[in-house]
Image (tube, coloured by chain):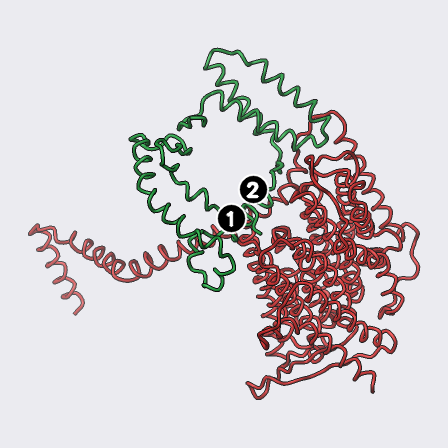
Chain colours: A red, B green
């Protein structure tokens, strides 16, 4: 009894601590917000959120809180209901830990910005929206969080609004997320009309859910989590400052779509069509993103595509009917992906804004801490045994191998895993090793505690998180226990093959042959020709059909042909036919007269 | 005048030099390691130098056209662009913080009191700008040819006691990177 009370209180306390820097300036005139204060707030909230997590790990207590209800229709209840279950209680400390490290890093990175407090307030508002989304038991509250993260993503990507590309990227993010929202609203409408509730518990039933609302949920996840089809916004979102990329577009916002599917998982369980859609979509996304990452030269774009690829892997896990494993991958991925972004931010700032890996090199000697943590993050991403990524990624691939589902999805995922190793090693080789290619006289130093502390903290997390989470949270479904050796080591083997491919490619870059374009490289460089094709074709077709509709259908057809002109045409045709009869010859008139007399005499 | 005259058409030399520079930059994007780049850059330079003394303009233009087509076929899909150049990652990044100087006139007196030495002199500077404006415009009108200016470069002040034309825009330009 007291356990639940303690659980509820500590979760609500965490949420209130987060809200403090936003609410206090509104309530008191003398309260001055600052980046350091916001960082300390998030740190306090993280430490507070460890309490419910420990309670959950110890006693497996879960609870649902239902507050005030929005009474606007008699039959339909929309309470503010918060669910403290395994997912929200594990996600809170992880998200807060990652956010604390990113905010501490951002105090150094964004130090020269004029409106730095506004930036931190935006990040905090984003965090609040994300945590609302996580803890929501209600589709309505989830939708509020969903839209909140979308809006904050727009504001943060377009932070430097003088830059045309940043504005385009922000608009792109909003539009693609909106297309996904159509699916979410569709499924919410179906839920409201069929089950008369938006509470997630009450929507589960043992009978099959029809495919349409599930496809709506999958569309929402495609939009928010950048699966293939609605993916271009994620690489474009790298226009925002690096702390934004680290927080939103790697650890927290982009997993919101997958989180939605995890929450509504019992609806998906019985519907094989929906599961197969998830599986194939995820496999396609992960391979496509991994292919695109192979030839990118901007360090942030490489990491963005690796995020996209891992999101595809999470979608594959959903398609395998394993929501808990998907959540484990979300948790471990948050650590090393945020760390990769922070390391790249440290490198970029030290090199005075240089983001191209062709102008970096030899940083291992110049930035030892950053590059060591970059290596740890890359090893975790590749699924090196017993680092964080291994526990989730290897399990996913084992389950994929064992299941009797799609072989094609399996092939794509294995290929994507080897490509992950390839582009990761390529990035490592070009950034850290060899002679340096950057401009001379660049003062490079990482002596600041505000840089090294967050990065090393996250490195510690990347190493231990997988072990800790899997030790304390037992799985709900039995994992596969026995399998042939080849199946068990499939992930490691394809990773090693990917490493060998990367080493081979780097050898060719050193040999004296003039490089040229080829088809595969062009496909990868232009991101699969997807952006120009969809952005131009769809908008020109839409506008063209709109123009045709307005001018030909409405103006010409309805207003002219069906109306006055059409009638006039018919009339002129009729009158022209009849005027041919008026020839003017007397003989014709006499003969027609005689013919009609004859007919009348004969008929009577 | 110190600045070269810009006409509406490029000379052959300018076109060849532009082709050479952009092909070197794309070569640099392809050949990442410096020793390999230097090898191929020397080969490229030799190819350009071989046809350096062609006096026949028709043949020279044909060579230039062949060179441009070869460049198009061999260009890099993601050429290296410097961060502050157009198309680079930090181009126009601080544009939103660059506001014009007349906004200073709208500051509240309490804000103006934070920078007393600047605002004390500001009125004198503005008076100077008002007085010299007519003379600057007159100088520019005299010096511009009838069918429009040939170059973007501004002339210096010609007479004693005059100020260079459009000096106020230059002096009150915003910082490159804001504080």
Residue A7: x and y, percent? 79, 80
Residue A101: x and y, percent? 75, 60
Q: Is residue A192 depicted above or below A290 in this figure?
A: below
Left or right: residue A161 compared with residue A112: left
Left or right: residue A283 compared with residue A150: right
Residue A533: x and y, percent? 55, 47
Q: Chain of mark 2?
A: B
Q: Which residue is mark 1?
A: A536
Tag nearer the camera, 1 or 2: 2
Q: Residue furthest left?
A: A586
Q: Is residue A322 depicted above or below B24 in this figure?
A: below
Residue A299: x and y, percent? 69, 45
Q: Quadrant of the N terminus of chain A?
A: bottom right
Q: Is residue B64 depicted above or below A122 in this figure?
A: above
Q: Quadrant of the C terminus of chain A?
A: bottom left
Q: Which residue is mark 2?
A: B87
């Amino acid at each position: 009894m007291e356990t639940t009370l303690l659980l509820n209180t500590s979760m609500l306390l965490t949420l209130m601590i987060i809200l403090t820097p936003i609410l206090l300036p509104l309530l008191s005139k003398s309260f001055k917000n600052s980046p350091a204060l916001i960082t300390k707030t998030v740190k306090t909230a993280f430490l507070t959120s460890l309490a419910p997590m420990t309670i959950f790990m110890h006693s497996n207590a879960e609870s649902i809180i239902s507050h005030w209800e929005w009474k606007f229709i008699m039959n339909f209840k929309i309470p503010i209901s918060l669910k403290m279950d395994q997912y929200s209680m594990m996600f809170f400390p992880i998200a807060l830990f990652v956010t604390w490290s990113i905010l501490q890093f951002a105090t150094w990175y964004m130090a020269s910005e004029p409106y730095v407090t506004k930036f931190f307030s935006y990040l905090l508002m984003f965090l609040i929206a994300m945590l609302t989304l996580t803890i929501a038991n209600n589709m309505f509250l989830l939708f509020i969080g969903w839209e909140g993260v979308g809006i904050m993503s727009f504001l943060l990507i377009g932070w430097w609004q003088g830059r045309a590309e940043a504005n385009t990227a922000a608009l792109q993010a909003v539009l693609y997320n909106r297309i996904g929202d159509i699916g979410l609203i569709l499924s919410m409408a179906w839920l409201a009309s069929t089950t008369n509730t938006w509470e997630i518990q009450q929507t589960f039933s043992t009978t099959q859910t029809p495919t349409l609302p599930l496809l709506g949920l999958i569309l929402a996840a495609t939009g928010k989590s950048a699966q293939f089809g609605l993916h271009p916004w994620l690489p474009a979102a790298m226009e925002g400052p690096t702390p934004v990329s680290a927080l939103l577009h790697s650890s927290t916002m982009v997993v919101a779509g997958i989180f939605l599917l995890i929450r509504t998982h019992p609806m998906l369980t019985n519907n094989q069509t929906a599961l197969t859609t998830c599986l194939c979509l995820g496999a396609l996304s992960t391979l496509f993103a991994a292919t695109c990452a192979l030839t990118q030269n901007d360090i942030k774009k490489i990491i963005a595509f690796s995020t996209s690829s891992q999101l595809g892997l999470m979608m594959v896990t959903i398609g395998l009917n394993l929501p808990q494993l998907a959540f484990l991958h979300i948790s471990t991925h948050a650590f090393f992906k945020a760390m990769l972004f922070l390391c790249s931010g440290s490198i970029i700032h030290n090199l005075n804004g240089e983001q191209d890996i062709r102008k970096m090199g030899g940083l291992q000697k110049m930035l030892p801490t950053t590059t060591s943590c970059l290596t740890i993050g890359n090893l975790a991403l590749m699924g090196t045994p017993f680092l964080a990524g291994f526990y989730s990624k290897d399990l996913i691939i084992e389950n994929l191998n064992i299941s009797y589902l799609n072989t094609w999805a399996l092939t794509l995922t294995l290929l994507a895993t080897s490509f992950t190793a390839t582009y990761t090693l390529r990035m490592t080789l070009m950034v850290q090793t060899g002679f340096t290619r950057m401009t001379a006289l660049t003062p490079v130093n990482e002596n600041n505690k505000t840089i090294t502390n967050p990065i090393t903290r996250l490195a510690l997390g990347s190493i231990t998180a997988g072990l800790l989470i899997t030790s304390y949270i037992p799985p709900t479904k039995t994992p596969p226990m026995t399998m042939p050796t080849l199946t068990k080591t499939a992930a490691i083997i394809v990773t090693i093959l990917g490493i060998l491919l990367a080493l081979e490619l780097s050898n060719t870059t050193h040999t004296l042959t003039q490089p040229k374009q080829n088809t595969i490289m062009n496909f990868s460089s232009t991101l699969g020709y997807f952006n120009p094709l969809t952005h131009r074709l769809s908008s020109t077709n839409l506008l063209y059909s709109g123009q045709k509709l307005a001018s030909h259908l409405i103006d010409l057809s309805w207003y002219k042909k069906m109306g006055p002109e059409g009638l006039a045409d018919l009339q002129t045709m009729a009158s022209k036919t009849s005027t041919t009869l008026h020839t003017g010859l007397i003989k014709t008139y006499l003969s027609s007269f005689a013919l009609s007399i004859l007919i009348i005499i004969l008929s009577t | 005048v110190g600045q070269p005259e810009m006409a509406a058409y490029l000379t052959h030399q300018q076109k060849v030099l532009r082709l050479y520079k952009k092909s070197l930059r794309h070569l640099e994007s392809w050949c990442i390691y410096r020793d390999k780049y230097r090898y191929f850059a020397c080969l490229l330079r030799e190819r350009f130098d071989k046809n350096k003394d062609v006096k026949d303009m028709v043949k020279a233009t044909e060579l230039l056209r062949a060179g441009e087509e070869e460049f198009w076929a061999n260009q890099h899909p993601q050429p290296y662009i410097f961060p502050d150049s157009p198309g680079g990652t930090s181009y126009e990044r601080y544009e939103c913080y660059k506001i014009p100087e007349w906004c200073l006139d709208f500051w509240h007196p309490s804000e103006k009191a934070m920078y007393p030495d600047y605002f004390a002199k500001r009125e004198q500077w503005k008076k100077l700008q008002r007085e010299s404006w007519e003379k600057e415009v007159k100088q520019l009108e005299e010096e511009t040819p009838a069918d429009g200016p040939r170059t973007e470069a501004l002339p210096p002040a010609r007479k004693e006691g005059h100020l260079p034309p459009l000096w106020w825009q230059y002096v009150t330009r915003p910082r490159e990177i804001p504080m």
